[in-house]
Image (cartoon, rainbow, N blue to C red):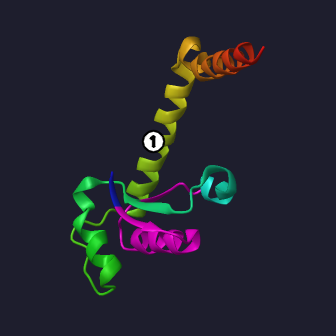
Amino acid sequence: MKHLRKYNDLYEAQSAASRLRAFGVLAFVSNEHSRTHSFITDAFSVGLWVVLDTQYSDPMALLDDENHIVENPISEEAMLRLEAEAKTSINYELKSGSLANLLFIPALLILVILGVYLKSV
């Protein structure tokens, strides 16, 4: 996956991703959900990524020139299959994660809070 562009407008990034998909380029918008909570996360921008590295030159050209002819398009069926495989893989990783890995961050947070509290007492 390679980064294409940074956008300050979520709708503009989503529109660009949709345009790329219509031409057979699988794209992904990052920080899509954290953008809606930007007052908390400071994520004031979103990123547009091409999923397949082999397609990198096509979306770069297509974003600048709507008449560009995509050299390596993939079908909608192939995009749907890749998306389904990615979701399955992520779900598997989450389910197979050890209990220690799942509890590490909350445990670390509790230790930090406890340390701050004990210093103040």
Q: Is residue 9 magenta?
A: yes
Judge left or right: residue 96 versus residue 24: right
Q: Which residue is depicted at the point 50% across and 35% down?
A: 90
Q: Nearer the viewer, residue 69 or 119?
A: 119
Where is residue 36 drawn, in percent x and y?
67, 59
Name the residue at the right extreme: 121
Quadrant of the image for the C terminus? top right
Where is residue 101 drawn, in percent x and y?
54, 17
Q: Which residues are magenta?
A: 4-33
Classed neighbour count for the residue bearing mark 1: other residues with Cα under 10 Å, few (<14), some (14–19), many (≥20): few
Q: Which residue is mark 1?
A: 86
Where is residue 83 drawn, in percent x and y?
46, 49
Q: Which residue is depicted at the point 48% across and 71% down?
A: 18
Q: Could you tell me if residue 62 is visible in this image?
A: yes
Q: Which residue is depicted at the point 31% across and 77% down?
A: 62
- Disc 1 element: helix
Judge left or right: residue 81 versus residue 55: right
